[in-house]
Image (cartoon, rainbow, N blue to C red):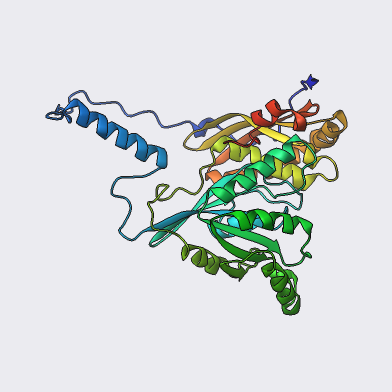
Amino acid sequence: MDHTTNTPHDAEVLDRDVDDLALDEDREFDEDDAIEEFDPFEGLSDEEIDAMADAEDAASNLGLVAGDTPEGFRSGFVALVGRPNAGKSTLLNACMGSKVAITSPVAQTTRRRMRAIVERDGYQLVFVDTPGIHKPKDGLGSELNRSALAELSDVDVVAFLIDASVPIGRGDEWIAERVRASHATKILVLTKADKVDQTAMMVQLDRARELVDFDDMIVVSSTEHFNVEPFIELVSEHLPAGPRWFPKGMDTDTDDATLVAEFVREKVLLRTREEVPHSVGVVCDAFERTRKLVRAHATVYVEREGQKGILVGRRGEMIKHIGTDARRDLERLFGRKVFLALDVRVQRGWRDDEREIRRMGYAFEE
């Protein structure tokens, strides 16, 4: 395996004085403060204490808070599945009201499963954005398919997204076979309604209904925000009674370093064409958050020297643009200033290397 290390290229020059970004000094503790000592476990047996600990661990693992679930509350997991570019991540962002998932016209934009939480009065929806299901051409493609298909057996609702503007083909039919085998509630979501007229829409609806015996269906346009809220309400009607799986105010279970890597990769996809996007993997190597500033470093991996040259660009202009674009989105996401530095390295054949696929976070996890 050829692993070539190259000279780092800063994504941007920090053009602001960071001296004023230091954290406030910790408040000094007043030793004269009165503290009343007590034993919270006084009077409890060892068995009772063990039982309390087990219950707290279980609640923590599930993201549950004791007494946090109102009576009659409904909750569930909803998988968004479909062919590449069916509009899964765009619909997810529309449901969230902000950008949490990356989007681009390039197939395989989504490589990691993302859970995003939408909560309304009386219910909590956990959307699972999956990679587009496609015919794999390498080890990475196989892993992405495994990740997407695994969700069909582990959710309460499957939302099968079909692009209204593209004729239904063998790819949709292949996915439909897997959707039919799922025990989850099945909802047809015809996307990109703004791109076709009503006659074409009805033809596509009739053809889509031949694929699966759907429990419900809806037409949406995520970019125009048409029927997005009705889609959320429709899905909620099929949720079982259940707990609040994630705390109030939590938008996604994706960690900060992964978000950095994904937003950098999105800008690579948007800035480059042809063979480069599919060969790109991104890892966030360092992440530090203070009250006013985020510092992050990410490495962009490609498979050939020529691809590296395209990404770096003349005098480093391309990688600077990619870093600047990513930083702007990350500042909106994190709500503070971001200093982002990028490297570009060659890792030959990484898409067929199981260890590298796993290291970059694109492997299917059981």
Position of 335 relative to 94 (above/below): above
In depth, the one of 89 and 29 nearer the eye is 89
Can you name the residue that lies furthest to the bottom here?
A: 199
Where's the N terminus, which quadrant?
top right
Residue 359 is situated, as x and y percent measured from the top left of the image, at 65, 28
In depth, the one of 277 and 292 nearer the eye is 277
In depth, the one of 331 and 271 nearer the eye is 271
Position of 334 relative to 304 (above/below): below
Residue 2 is situated, as x and y percent measured from the top left of the image, at 81, 20
Residue 120, image quadrant: bottom left
Where's the C terminus, which quadrant?
top right
Question: Count the marks: how many?
Answer: 0
Horizontally, is 344 left or right of 127 in the view?
right
Residue 360 is situated, as x and y percent measured from the top left of the image, at 66, 31
Q: Residue at x 75, y 79 (%)?
A: 199
Horizontally, is 297 left or right of 35 in the view?
right
Horizontally, is 65 left or right of 48 in the view?
right
Can you name the residue that lies furthest to the right here?
A: 306
Q: Residue at x 78, y 45 (%)?
A: 271
Can you name the residue that lies furthest to the front here?
A: 181
Residue 196 is situated, as x and y percent measured from the top left of the image, at 75, 72
Question: Is there any visible trace of residue 111 in the rendered image?
Answer: no
